[in-house]
Amino acid sequence: AERGDADLRWWVDHIGADAPPGQAAQPLELPRDRPRPAVQTYRGELAGSALSQATSDAVPALAADLGTTAPTVLLAGFGELLRRMTGRADLVIGTPAADRRHEEFTDLVGFFIEIVPLRLRMRRPEESFADRVRACTDEFVAALAHPGATLDRIVGGLGLPRDPARAPLVQVLFNVYNFPQPRLELPGLRTERLE
């Protein structure tokens, strides 16, 4: 609460500044095979795809070379995919972030997650992928440095219209789950995971 108003001003300037007319409020339209329902239902399917071993090895190697993290490299790749799918080079997507900044929250049981908007700008075609990774790193650091304004306050501060068919600012989430796969170990038995 102490820094909420200052953080809100930063977010309004950051998301709304130098965006093309209406861009901050413009929904991120992804290709789809059915019309969008009039009211958001949250029904959908999960689609997955595994990276090749070479790509899986290259992601952390590139991150180390650029002094960043593997999720930031993946975010840059995801941003490029969305740019190609939508034709837009200035995107706002969301990422969940754990909000346990205060030591007092460490032992509390609860779901301390906030959706943080990330603005990905890929306006210069001559940018290298490494440049985009660095820009994603800068965006992550800047966004996480302004946790005092919640997503609903940011939406209100931007004056975005409400539409029951979609979320007002963030329609796409990016998240990297880097938890180790749990293993079931039972004495005297050999186990294997089946999809």
Image: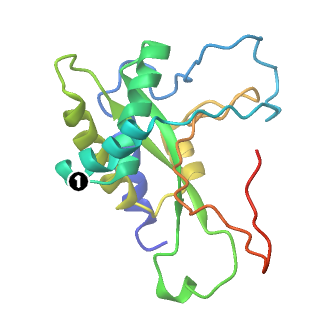
Left or right, 127 with reference to 109: left
> Where on the picture, by quarter, is residue 19?
top left
Could you tell whether 14 is left or right of 177 in the image? left
- 79 w.r.t. 190: above or below: above
Residue located at (47% from left, 82% from top) = 102
Amino acid type at image mark 1: Ala
Residue 150: where, in percent of width, then height?
54, 56
When the figure is inspected, residue 133 is found, relative to residue 99, above or below; the finding is above
Name the residue located 49 percent from the left edge and 37 percent from the top edge. Answer: 93
Q: Position of residue 46 (x, y in %)?
A: 72, 35
Question: Callout 1 environment at 10 Å: few (<14), some (14 to 19), or many (20+)?
Answer: few
Residue 113 place in picture, x, y as percent: 60, 62
Residue where numbered disc 1 is placed: 64
Q: Where is residue 157 in the image (x, y as percent from the top left)?
A: 50, 45
Left or right for 72, reference 62: right
Quick check: 36 left or right of 24?
Answer: right
Q: Which residue occupies the foreground of this view, 152 or 50?
A: 50
User: Quadrant of residue 28 in the image?
Assistant: top right
Which quarter of the rendered picture does the C terminus lie within?
A: top right
Q: Nearer the viewer, residue 53 or 36?
A: 53
